[in-house]
Amino acid sequence: MDSEEQQKDFYSQWSEFQRSFFSQWSESYIKLYQPWMDALKLWQGMKTPATGLDLFSEWSKMIQATLGRSVEQAEAGLGSTVYFRILRASNVFVVLNEFWLEVLRELPELHESKGDALKSREIFERWAQRYSKVFEQLMGSPPSATAQEIMTSWLNTTQTYQSTAALMWNPWLQAMPQLREQAERYMKGDLSSLTEARSLWREVYDETLGRVFIMPAFGLTKEQTERLRRTYDAFVRYWSSVPVLYQFFHTTGMEALKEVFDKVQNLKVEEMKPETLREIYQIWWTTNENAYFELFKTPEFGNAMGEVLNYGLRFKKRLDELTAEWCKAMSIPSYREFDEVAMSVHELRKKVRMQQKTIEELQRKLEPTTSRQRRK
Amino acid sequence: MELPFEKQTALLAKEIEGYSSRLLKATETLLKTEDVEIGISSKDLVLQEDKIKLYHFRPRKKELCPVPLLITYALVNRETMMDLEEGRSLIRNMLELGLDIYIIIWGYPSRLDRYVTLDDCIDMYLGDCVDYVRKEKGVEKINLMGVCQGGTFSIIYAALYPEKIRNLVAMVAPVDFDTDDGLLNVWARYMDIDLMVDTMGNIPGDFMNLGFLMLKPFQLMVDKYVGLVESAEDPALLENFLRMEKWIFDSPDQAGETFRKFLNEMYRKNSLIKGELEIGGRKVDLKNISMPVLNIYADQDHLVPPSSSKPLEKFVSSKDVTTTSFPVGHIGMYVSSKSQRALGPLIAGWLVERSGGVPVAKPKPIVPGGKTQGAGARKAAFPKTKKKE
């Protein structure tokens, strides 16, 4: 660029700068003083005493807005941070002020509606709605860090409660469709659905109610509560183990029945005589005996039988513990006391026996000495 | 050609009439019967320790075998099975053959006995009975015969105290419990024995009965009673049936700690033949059994399968082991007509031969069906006897 061009460029830059500065100044001027100009217009438009309150409210808002803008333009630092916090706190005052302004405006209406319960109620409901909006506005303003901590804790607590409740009910809700489907299959005669339904039911129970029954209790009745819960749990487990065993018996019975039919058909009975009936009876019970013998040997049956037996024993054990506690309360000896006595008696018996043997041995040793003495 | 409908109906009607008539007659007999006696041979109580009683059967011969015989029955059910009724009494048969017999009766354990252990049963009670007989008869050694679980007890005792036993007879006695041939052996694997004993204390006899009935549910709970109606017209047969019923359901409770150790050590761990069983603080070594052994098992035994009782000869050091079987079931061993004629003479003959007594007449050969034949007849189908070389 030559010198003439350089001179032109500098001038265009300077004028551009001037334009930009003025434009910014006018913008900031408008932003800064606009609220005052609006308030002035309002002042000029005032007519009734009640609007004094409006004036105050508008004035408060104007101050908030002006000061707020000043803070935005101020340099960052401790001072501006604190100033911003003050402004935020005063915003609460402004918002509440508007609410009370509306309440005061409606007081004459409330006074007029004295005796009219419906009208009074309507006015109060309007106030309540407005107050909830105020509350929302206030709650909407950024809370302090402490308030935030409290709110977070409260929200987390609520969420935890909901999650816990969900933990209890969601598994059941999720399992419902499958359980329904299994119930339908059972109705149609498919007994394998019984085992599946029971497994699913147990899984969900273990995740939900089962945990409630085995969790520790608190307080004075801790032991009794835990005992009672464990009894419930034992009963549920025993009760839920029975269907599987039943299924084995039923399935085997059906299969044996089919075999009986085949054998009876092979008899090629031409006429029904009593001997034939006896023969069919013989086929029936021997076929079933063999079928169940084969079933009883299988590990699956053994496991199912063992489960029912063991769960049944645990349930009985829990019931006995409950009974013993009730007996204790009524001063009735229970199995525990009997067992203590039994143990003592057993040990005493052994002691007596040992002593008897010792005495007999000593007598035997003494015998030669005694006979010698007698001979003398 | 199919019978006309009327003819078929007539046949069925006659069948129903016959069935009803028999049932009515059975009802008549049953309603008149208050109780039946079992255990026909006279005996005297000679020793009592706690609930255990030792009886001495009154001898029926003047010349007795010089070595007395002590019979140990199982804790399960009663020993009266061996002395059920006239014509079906193994004990009577052996008394008639000159054996001098004592028997231990374990009694009916109550809650007070729940801490009686297996060690107490074998080391203490059985031991005291053996010592009593030895002292009473003035002999160093006696003959010991164990039946079923009592056989296992006798085998253990003989291994611990071989110096007190002259001859050992094991009848349907389980030694090797690791077998799938018996349902009891299979089921025991799935049961929590400790939980059972901790919960119930003593194991109820009814519980044991239920288990035994479930081994053959249709035969024992249905067919047996259906068959009864067929023979109900004969009061004598009906009474025999009632005696069997009385015995079957006469089940003492099992002392808890005895049951615990027996099931855990035998059925779960099979520790007897492994040499790991301890009784009274001493290891049970079957190799200590050096005296003559007669091992009798039942071919059709569903309670103690042959695979459980037969292997005894493999574990003892005795050079004189006789293993014999009968084609009967567990109970049939004592009450079946097939075994009645042969079992008593077999045991008596074997014992007397080894006790220095007067030889007993050898048992007559028996063919299947229970008929006996004289010399020259074809060889008996049973008993099958094998002697250890």
Image: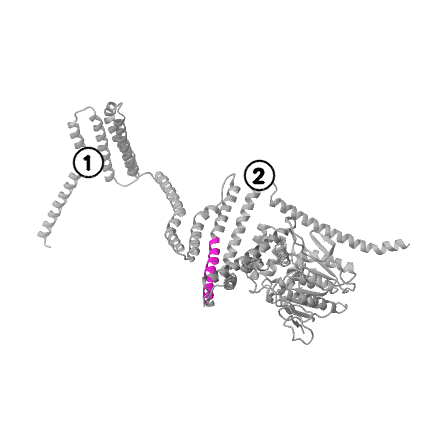
Secondary structure mostly taken by the magenta-highlighted segment of the chain: helix
Q: Foreground residue, B77 or A140?
A: B77
Q: Foreground residue, A24 or B45?
A: B45
Q: Which amino acid is tagged 2?
A: Ala
Colouring mode (rainbow / by chain / secondary structure / one colour): one colour
Q: Is residue B288 above or below residue A157?
A: below
* 2 and 1 marks in contact (CB < 8 Å): no
Give the residues in magenta.
A241-265
**Residue A335 lies in the magenta-colored region:** no
**Residue A249 lies in the magenta-colored region:** yes
Looking at the rendered structure, the secondary structure element under dot 2 is helix
Q: Of callouts 2 and 1, which one flags the residue occurring earlier in the amino acid sequence?
A: 1
Image location (x, y in percent) of residue B197: 59, 52
Q: Which amino acid is tagged 1?
A: Leu
In this figure, which residue is indicated by the disc labeled 2?
Answer: A329
In this figure, which residue is indicated by the disc labeled 1?
Answer: A32
Q: Is residue B43 visible?
A: yes
Q: Same chain for marks 2 and 1?
A: yes
Q: Residue at x 51, y 54 (%)?
A: A308
Alpha carbons under labels 2 and 1: distance apart: 84 Å
Looking at the rendered structure, the secondary structure element under dot 1 is helix
Q: Residue at x 56, y 65 (%)?
A: B181
How many marks overall? 2
